[in-house]
Amino acid sequence: MMKHDFFAFLSRMKYIARWSLMRSTVQENIQEHSHMTAVIAHALGLIRRDIFGRSCSPEELAAIALYHDAPEILTGDLPTPIKYHSGTIKSAYDEVERIAVEKLLSELPDALRPAYRDLLTAAEDPARYELVKAADKLSAYIKCIEERKAGNLEFGSAEAATLGRLRAMQLPEVDYFLDHFISGFEKNLDELGTLE
């Protein structure tokens, strides 16, 4: 019987740290980030479908988001300022990520590869990926807010830049999320309330 290591690889997402160039009060790994990104992508899909009346599959967005950083299990999380420093670096990193995707897919039975290839390569279709990309940025923005609330000024410029990029996306779903849900991340537990 053939053995496959795909899920063993995925379980290692918890060992890949994000924000490696930043001093964090709470370290974040790509497993935690992927979960939050999936929650937000699902919400953005529901907002698109149920608030704005546009066709959308929130479940598909959540699944794509769960796997959006999976290649980083093998590549690590290259800091954004480095990854996007030049077209040459970005192109080289994209090729490394493509090789990582193929390695992960090789760890699956043949019958499951097409479904996982669809999830792991969704970013290649910008229209299909736009809300997942937005959710990824919203997750980063929330991390910046949490760090600021903890007194860490290290994330100040990242917070402002990320909010600017989010608004520049001009996606009504993102604006809706920012306008209706982000303020909750400014609250402490007492302000959020308990089961009283």
Image (tube, rainbow, N blue to C red):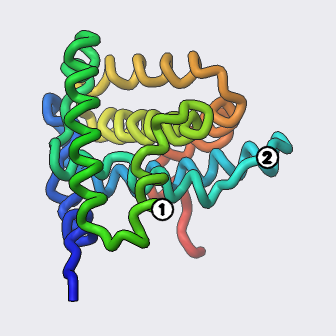
Please state, as top left, top right, bottom left or bottom right, where the N terminus lies in the image.
bottom left
In the image, 127 versus 145, the foreground residue is 127
Amino acid type, mark 2: Ser
User: Whole-percent x and y of residue 62?
Assistant: 54, 56
- Residue at image position (26%, 25%) is 80
Q: Which mark is residue 115?
A: 1
> Left or right of 113: which side holds 138?
right
In the image, 75 versus 175, the foreground residue is 75
Give the residue pinned by disc 2. Answer: 55
CB under 8 Å between discs 2 and 1: no
Q: Which mark is residue 107?
A: none
User: Whole-percent x and y of residue 96?
Assistant: 20, 35
Q: Residues within 10 Å of mark 1 (few under 14, many from 20)?
A: few
User: Whole-percent x and y of residue 9?
Assistant: 20, 64
> Left or right of 73: which side holds 113?
right
Q: Secondary structure at mark 2?
A: loop
